[in-house]
Amino acid sequence: MAVAGPPLAQVEGLTYRYGGTERDALTDVSLTLEPGELVAVLGPSGSGKSTLLRALAGLVPHFHGGRFRGSVTVGGCDTRWTRPAQLAGTVASVFQDPEQQIVMTAVTNEVAFGLENLGTPPAEIRRRVEEALELVGALHLAGRRAAELSGGELQRVCLASAVALRPHLILLDEPTSQLDPAGAEDLLATLPDLGSAAVISEQRVGRALACADRVLYMENGRLLLDAPHAQALTWLASERPPFAGAPAIPGLDAPSAGPPVLTMLDVDFAYHDGPPVLSGVSLQVRAGEIVALEGPNGCGKTTLAKLAAGLLTAQSGSATRAGRAGYLSQDPGRYLVRDRVDDEVALAVGGDRARAAGSLAAFGLVDLARRHPRDLSSGERERLGIAAVAVAEPDLLVLDEPTRGVDPVRKQELAAWLAEYAAAGNAVLVAAHDRDFPAHRRVQLGIREVARV
Amino acid sequence: MRLAPGLAPGAAALGLAGAAAAALLSNRVATAAAIAVLLLAIVMRAPARRRWPYVVGGLVSGLGVFLLSPVLAVHGSHVLWSGPIVPMLGPLDVTREEISSAALHGSRLAAVAFAFAAYALLLDHDRLLAAVAGARRSALMAALAIRLMPTLERDAVGLAEAVRGRGVAVEGLRGRGRLLSPLVAGSLERALNLAESMEARGFGRAGRTRQPQARWRARDWTTVALAAAVAAGAALWL
């Protein structure tokens, strides 16, 4: 809960535009943050949430350049005259992609990196590292190397790196995007114990709302709502229902029982000389059916999805497909190969831009067709990835975490599109942490020594 | 996997540098080749899927120099094979002296490549970085640059998989070549994100401290002394 006292941060009339763009990322945003309060920032993809967090860290404008009007004051420092490195310690950030913010090779050194930069007495560093790891439930990772960790584990390490600095304000940009539901709930539950004010940008709005004292809602760079939790819930329920936290995705009709499109029998798999990841897995997906693969981080969902799509070959057992398979990897926004959005989609259909336009329309990307894919927001990239796979209309569509970073409105649209796609006689296999995502059948992968269906 | 458990990374790095220097300073094929083989044996301790680009790179470079330089060089009097006269290059004769010189240069290059591979694959770069008293920013940049190789390798696998997942074959040199530009773009984007993260975590601020480091022990000093002795010996006698 908020503590009475001088404001921790103040944003006044902030309007900001990134260099080389023609639209303001933030328009006339004003808000105040009090010490100790937990604030959730909601809004569609590309609404300016991440930019607001960067402005609070001083990275906008110092790191990104662009046009900056208005002011941001954090801990009494005006960010126009204070570099982000000087604000570090007062502010700590956890960015969207944990893999792209790891500097050191060992977990403990990674957490110590910020402490060393801030001049923490050497004798204190180890203790603070251990405390931070323990606080976020990652003490067991202390002896590990960053390259060996899963995305979810890396997310915890990044949070520990921020927490170790004992900042007054912690900025979290999609901090649970790679965690399974239990892990995400555990992690968000630790926030009140940190003693810092926290601003959390999340697309899984239910979780963010559950821990927030106050809610901000943004659209097109404007702050439309800044209200305490209860008042915000009322506003969201009436004005922006998909962001009110309750699952609003409609259920599915019973599938039409088509012929099997994917049949996996007694499949075993291990990477190189490593331990088995899957053992004795059997799975069938029929035409017209959406099957969700569920399970905790590290249980082998991605491996099973790749085997289903034919990108990996099982060491024993069989995986047979009737027809073509398409596969959407986790984090598809990282794997873009063309210079234009429409060309990216057209790649799978021999450069046919007319077919690409249909797929872009289905995923709300028509207006971005001429943009460079790497200029899109993370949610837009995610949708682009799906459009680029779906355009070829594979008989079996395999999606690995397709809702990561996707806002609730787009998630509803994706669910509706998948239902239609399956109803047209295609099979869909979705590996997802998202329990709300509709499916005809849910398959649970366990994590013991090896995963089994 | 470590180069030598219990050995300080700084001492291990200097040991590798000494071995590479010895190969470069030696004028005997047998010495340079023996050092290259020794370093290759060390590199083989790294996991197979990580070591292969380094091993292939080192072998191809060394063999490439060995095979090409006798044809292109013109020296020596003991002709073993007389080839045609090629405009610009002259006679493509191969002499015994040219083969001996090519073997020396090829061995030297392979030794240096394997020393770097052992450094990149088997040393604890965090501890090495922490041991650098001055120029820490440059040392960190060097450490990050060395880590670029495995990161690029992972990105390349992910990129090829994403394209294959769309039903587009990634085959042959041309198919893989097409992924080069997005791979570079992705790595630049990663570098920017990393730089942003480092700035936000106070990198570059004055008054930096570092975690307490273990002192060098007798075996570390012995390794460095041995490396210096081998390099000096190679220059003078080997």
Image: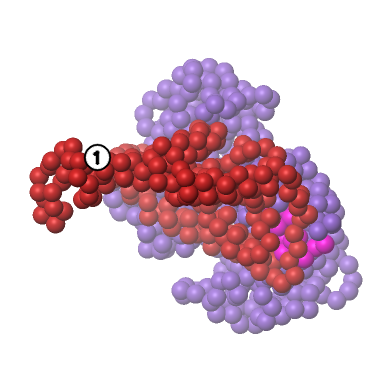
Q: Is A371 located above or below residue A244 in the figure?
A: below
Colour purple, chain: A
Q: Is A101 located above or below residue A421 in the figure?
A: below
> Residue A222 in the image: x percent, y percent?
61, 72
Query: Magenta residues: mostly which secondary structure?
Result: helix
Q: Colour of chain B?
A: red
Q: Quadrant of residue A74?
A: bottom right
Q: Residue at x 40, y 46 (%)?
A: B27
Is residue A118 found inside the magenta-colored segment of the image?
yes
Q: Is A381 located above or below residue B99 in the figure?
A: below
Q: Is residue B133 toward the left or the right of residue B188 in the image?
A: right
Q: Residue at x 75, y 78 (%)?
A: A77
> Residue A91 in the image: x percent, y percent?
74, 67
Residue A198 visible, this angle: no
> Residue A272 in the image: x percent, y percent?
52, 28
Is residue A141 found inside the magenta-colored segment of the image?
no
The subunit letter for the residue under badge 1 reads B
Q: Amino acid at mark 1?
A: Arg
Q: Secondary structure at mark 1?
A: helix
Q: Quadrant of residue A138?
A: top right
Q: Is residue A6 toward the left or the right of residue B3 in the image?
A: right
In this orientation, which residue lies closer to the viewer: A85 or A449? Answer: A85
Q: Where does the magenta region start and end?
A: A110-121
Placement of the N terminus of chain A among the 4 image quadrants = bottom right
In this orientation, which residue lies closer to the viewer: A86 or A73? Answer: A86
Residue marked by disc 1: B96
Q: Residue at x 36, y 29 (%)?
A: A323
In this orientation, which residue lies closer to the viewer: A313 or A207? Answer: A313
